[in-house]
Image (cartoon, rainbow, N blue to C red):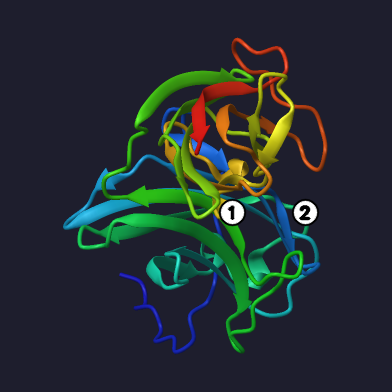
């Protein structure tokens, strides 16, 4: 028998095996969010969110982050992925070394896949939650910034029962987006309030703007409410395939005389780009219904 191995107080690193993996089939993972560069340090090239699976008293959402160091890292960074509510509080999180590697093992220009899981307890209150991610220095806790923010929003997850439109339409826009319907018109205090319901059939390449125009017989807008879905809280680049997005809208009716009008809805490329094609309307506008102004 050979000599017994010596007692080693400091572990010796012999090497590392780099396994190149990629998200599985499209029906399991969907690409969400947009690329971001944190400082001049690490680029987040892509993010994939998988279908949830049961796990204990809750569900697990698997994620894959594609990270690329842009310079030699002299400090250790941790990746964080949090699921936060409207109040900014996290109900699930996953923090740790990117792909389990410290800075010494991250090569400049090499894209790595960082697999993570968000466990959401069954006791989580129903509502809309946002997947946010970023990086921070392990020693100081200082977060790196991307476009002036210390995190990026990757996607939206609805927990609990989802509202259904009172009036169903199922109108298609540009082949990849459906306007499922709307919640009907509520006119009070000089405002028209309604909710639009959207669904994407697949990942969307950019953030589109919503237009909601109240028009007369000549299709000329008399009042309108344009802007990102849900006031910017649900950008289209974060929509997941099959997810229903509730988009509240409020239109100021000042100056609109009494009468019957049509509400036209659609999507366009910001700031003033072309409208997305809509089924049945060459101008990209879907007539969702008639509104009576008393």
Q: Give the quarter of the image for residue 153.
A: bottom right
Q: Secondary structure at mark 1?
A: helix
Residue identified by numbered label 2: 109
Lateral position of residue 172 relative to residue 185, left or right:
right
Contact? badges 2 and 1 (CB < 8 Å): no
> Which residue is rendered at x = 37% and y = 39% of the image?
51
Lateral position of residue 107 relative to residue 80, left or right:
right
Residue 262 screen position, x and y as percent? 58, 25
Of tags 2 and 1, the one toward the viewer is 1
> Which residue is rendered at x = 47% and y = 71% of the image?
88
Residue 159 screen position, x and y as percent? 32, 51
Q: Give the quarter of the image for residue 32.
A: top right
Does residue 208 appear in the picture of this structure?
A: no
- Decide: is 165 above or below 250: above
> Which residue is rendered at x = 42% and y = 37% of the image?
244
- Decide: is 95 above or below 265: below
Does residue 111 appear in the picture of this structure?
A: yes
In space, the residues marked 2 and 1 are separated at their CA atoms by 37 Å
Residue 152 screen position, x and y as percent? 62, 61
Residue 232 screen position, x and y as percent? 61, 53
Q: Residue furthest left?
A: 57
Residue identified by numbered label 1: 231
Instruction: Assess disc 1: are there few (<14), some (14-19) or many (≥20) residues with their C-alpha within 10 Å of its C-alpha.
Output: few
């Amino acid at each position: 028998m050979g000599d017994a191995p010596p007692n080693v107080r400091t572990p010796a690193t012999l090497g590392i095996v780099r396994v190149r993996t990629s998200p599985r089939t499209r029906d399991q993972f969907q690409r969400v969010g947009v690329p971001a560069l944190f400082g001049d340090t690490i680029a987040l090239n892509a993010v994939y969110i998988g279908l949830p699976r049961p796990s204990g008293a809750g569900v697990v959402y698997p994620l894959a982050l594609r990270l690329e160091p842009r310079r030699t890292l002299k400090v250790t960074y941790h990746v964080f992925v949090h699921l936060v509510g409207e109040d900014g509080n996290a109900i699930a999180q996953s923090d740790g070394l990117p792909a389990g590697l410290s800075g010494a093992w991250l090569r400049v220009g090499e894209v790595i896949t960082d697999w993570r899981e968000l466990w959401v307890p069954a006791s989580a209150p129903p509502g809309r939650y946002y997947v946010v991610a970023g990086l921070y220095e392990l020693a100081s806790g200082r977060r790196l910034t991307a476009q002036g923010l210390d995190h990026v929003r990757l996607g939206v997850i609805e927990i609990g029962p989802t509202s259904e439109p009172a009036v169903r339409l199922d109108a298609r826009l540009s082949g990849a987006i459906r306007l499922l319907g709307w919640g009907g018109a509520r006119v009070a205090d000089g405002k028209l309030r309604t909710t639009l319901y959207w669904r994407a059939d697949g990942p969307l390449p950019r953030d589109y703007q919503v237009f909601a125009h109240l028009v007369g017989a000549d299709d000329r807008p008399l009042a309108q409410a344009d802007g990102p879905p849900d006031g910017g809280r649900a950008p289209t680049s974060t929509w997941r395939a099959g997810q229903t997005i509730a988009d509240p809208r409020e239109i100021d009716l000042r100056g609109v005389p009494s009468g019957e009008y049509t509400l036209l809805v659609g999507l366009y490329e910001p700031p003033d780009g072309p409208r997305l094609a809509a089924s049945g309307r060459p101008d990209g506008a879907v007539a969702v219904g008639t509104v009576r102004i008393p």
